[in-house]
Amino acid sequence: MKLALMDNLWVVVSTVLVFFMLGGFILLEAGSTRMKNAGHIAGKTIITAGIGSLVFWAVGYGFIYGEGNAIIGLSNFFYGDFSFSGEGLSPATDFMFQMMFALVSLTIAFGGFAERAKLSAYVIFAILFSAFIYPVIAHWIWGGGWLGEDGSQDFAGSTVVHLTGAMAALAATIVLKPRIGKYNKDGSSNEIAGHNQVFTALGVLILWVGWFGFNAGSTFGVADAFLGFVALNTQLAAAAGAIAAMFIAWAVTGKADVPTTLNGALAGLVAITASSGFVEPWAAVVIGIVGGLMVFYSMKFFDKARIDDPIFALSVHGTVGVWGTLSNGLFAVPELSTDIGWGQAGLFYGGGFTQLGVQILSVVASGIYAFVVSFIILKVMDKVMGGIRVTEEEEIIGLDLSEHGGYGYPENIPHPTEKNKAGA
């Protein structure tokens, strides 16, 4: 009984850590974009977190973990199980932890909306994503679906959470098109710098701390102290990703670019999310280094492709999310995979190409589903709503004023009496 209580306590603490990651996303996204949209970014994150929570309670959890079939769960809607047998996790503890993952994936998806989408588009897509996109992929891999049955390894969600959100973000960037002034007629791009690198760095640090709940919390208990091993892998990969990204930017551009370094840390975290419970520490370092290098070149690739990704969600969570998932097919050790019945060992540990093939299938199936369904939903929304993008005038003014009637930095707008004094 005491051990079960400790398990529940650890998962509740992890739940809080993962939820606090939304605060990191607020600072990261606000700092990476322009001042005129800061209040909007903060507010819509809270609004959509509320929507995502209610939808997950109503149908999301049931679609993931309810009794159903290989494609979707079909029970446990409007969840409300208060029972606790004294063993394992209470249903409510498990439910709350799973809800946080859905909210993080939703927040990642909205990176593709940044600085140009109507608030109404956020609201409607939050409902549909939380009901019909994230739960389906989560069921396939974690809820007893066909990919899980095939042995797909995704310890804490490089595919389920990060790639799913990134593919929705990709669909949004395509439907919404680039921000005003981002690209020139000759195909060249203009940098639209974020307004506060301190916010961005603090956001990354909060996310880094929250990731210990994300990964180590996914052990669901404290009995064998395996959570410490997962936390170690998480720390090493994040550190390696940050340093690798900084050095590649320094080598290529001649400057140790701060935003690239910050994205490198996030890349290391995303990469290790799928493999934190499957690989040895030396492999975690390698996985983080590759993630840090990949995010640098991925950001350049999307920019050249004229895909405007203000928060770099496609690179950090998409490109690197794919790498993180595939890395299990290379580095998973038998003791943490084959021996416990969770897939097979990786290529470098005598498992051959079997697990790598499973991981590739998982990435392809999940990525295609998330992108195609998101794209269809957004195109229909765009048609029915008369556009999901704000007008040119509203975009220039900023979403703080055009969507909310206020300003994230109100002291920067002269008060009417101050205008009168200036005129006098």
Image (tube, helix red, strand yellow):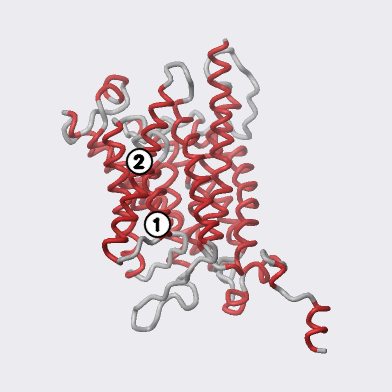
Left/right of residue 247 with respect to residue 383 in the rendered view: left
Q: Residues within 10 Å of mark 1 (few under 14, many from 20)?
A: many
- Who is closer to the viewer here, 218 or 109? 218
Name the quarter where the N terminus is drawn.
top right
Who comes first in sequence, dot 2 or dot 1? 2
Q: Position of residue 283 (x, y in %)?
A: 27, 36
User: Label 1 amino acid?
Assistant: Leu
Q: Position of residue 61 (x, y in %)?
A: 54, 35
Name the quarter where the C terminus is drawn.
bottom right
Residue that mark 1 sits on: 314
Helix, strand, or loop for circle 1? helix
Q: Which residue shows up at 59% across the image and 72% down it?
A: 390
Q: Position of residue 53 (x, y in %)?
A: 61, 42
Residue that mark 2 sits on: 237
Q: Which residue shows up at 16% across the image and 28% down it?
A: 350
Q: Which residue shows up at 54% across the image and 60% down it?
A: 31
Q: Position of residue 316 (x, y in %)?
A: 39, 53
Q: Residues within 10 Å of mark 2 (few under 14, many from 20)?
A: many
